Image (cartoon, rainbow, N blue to C red):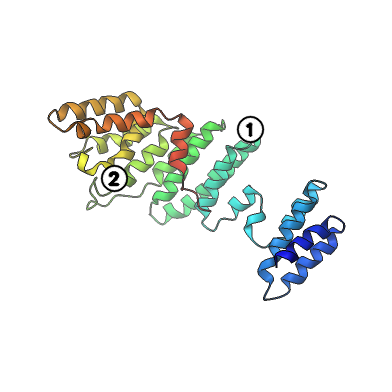
Amino acid sequence: TRGLVTAAAALAMVDVDEALAIAEKVGASQQWRWLRDQVVYRVASAVARADPDRALEIVGTASSPYGRTADQYARGLPIPVHGALAVGYLALRVDDQEQARAMVAEAIESIGTLATALLQSGLGENSYALAAARLAWIAQEVGYPDVQRPVTMALALRPARPRWVTAMDGMGALADLPLALGWADADVARALLEPVVTSPGAFDYEEQWRWQKALQAMAVADPEWAAAKVRELAAAHPDAKPNERWHWHVQLVEYLVMTRDEQFWALAAGQVGG
């Protein structure tokens, strides 16, 4: 099978149509259908330098998603909210500002369409709220004129928290949204965080893994506020072991020495399907 793919690529150097005919013959066989796209991609690679437009045209005939351009792949993701967010992230890599803004507008409209249906059902959805919050940061980065719209969408899409879910149980979700919103609207992020970080048991060392994201969200929204909080925590436990007493100082410093982009991409990592 490897020989067939190589032969098709070599043939493409002299006769592209004949090389593609091999791909179609392979695709017609139930046994070897899986090999068709490999032939297509090798043929496209063979002609890309001499005829890039033809190469893109050939790639477009592939049946799998892996040969698509990034934006085509993003729009084809099976979970719509992931597709909308992926298009938004791609806008950060577009040099043309007008195109970047258009992509952000597309992503916001997609989330808005999903949100309308969701809100009409009377439900909230945390993943949609987070996607809107991240789009707010992206919108700000590309100079989109209405950053407040995705911020408002994020707040509207917050799911109601049942009374039986304590702050401790839901700490991850409670900190996610303000952490995502912190770059676009620090005041809103702080308003969401205030009741969380002042609740009984906040920043308990024994539950440190639950509270790390909350501290990061504080640092994004207002670094001085976060610094005052960790000093307060240390003062409240003068007799604690050094590693416990100064734990939150270390955590905050480690986060603050990251660049703004590093902080955001740490948040974004793993959040987009595909």
Residue 60 visible at all: no
Q: Quadrant of residue 212?
A: top left
The quarter of the picture where the N terminus appears is bottom right
Image position, residue 259 (x, y; %): 45, 29
Secondary element type, mark 2: helix
Given the current orientation, which residue lies at the most extreme bottom position?
30
Secondary element type, mark 1: helix
**How far apart are the alpha carbons under marks 1 and 2?**
37 Å
Question: Which residue is painted at 31% across and 35% down in the image?
Answer: 215
As displayed, is residue 86 above or below residue 230? below
Read off the residue under disc 2: 171
Question: Which residue is painted at 45% across and 36% down in the image?
Answer: 264
Question: Which residue is painted at 25% across and 33% down in the image?
Answer: 247
Given the current orientation, which residue lies at the most extreme left position?
239
Image position, residue 18 (x, y; %): 84, 64
199 displayed left or right of 271: left
Residue 55 visible at all: yes
Name the amino acid type tagged 2: Met
Question: Which residue is painted at 42% across and 31% down in the image?
Answer: 185
Image position, residue 238 (x, y; %): 14, 28
Name the amino acid type tagged 1: Gln
230 displayed left or right of 41: left
Q: Give the total number of marks visible in the rendering.
A: 2
Read off the residue under disc 1: 97
Given the current orientation, which residue lies at the most extreme front position?
3
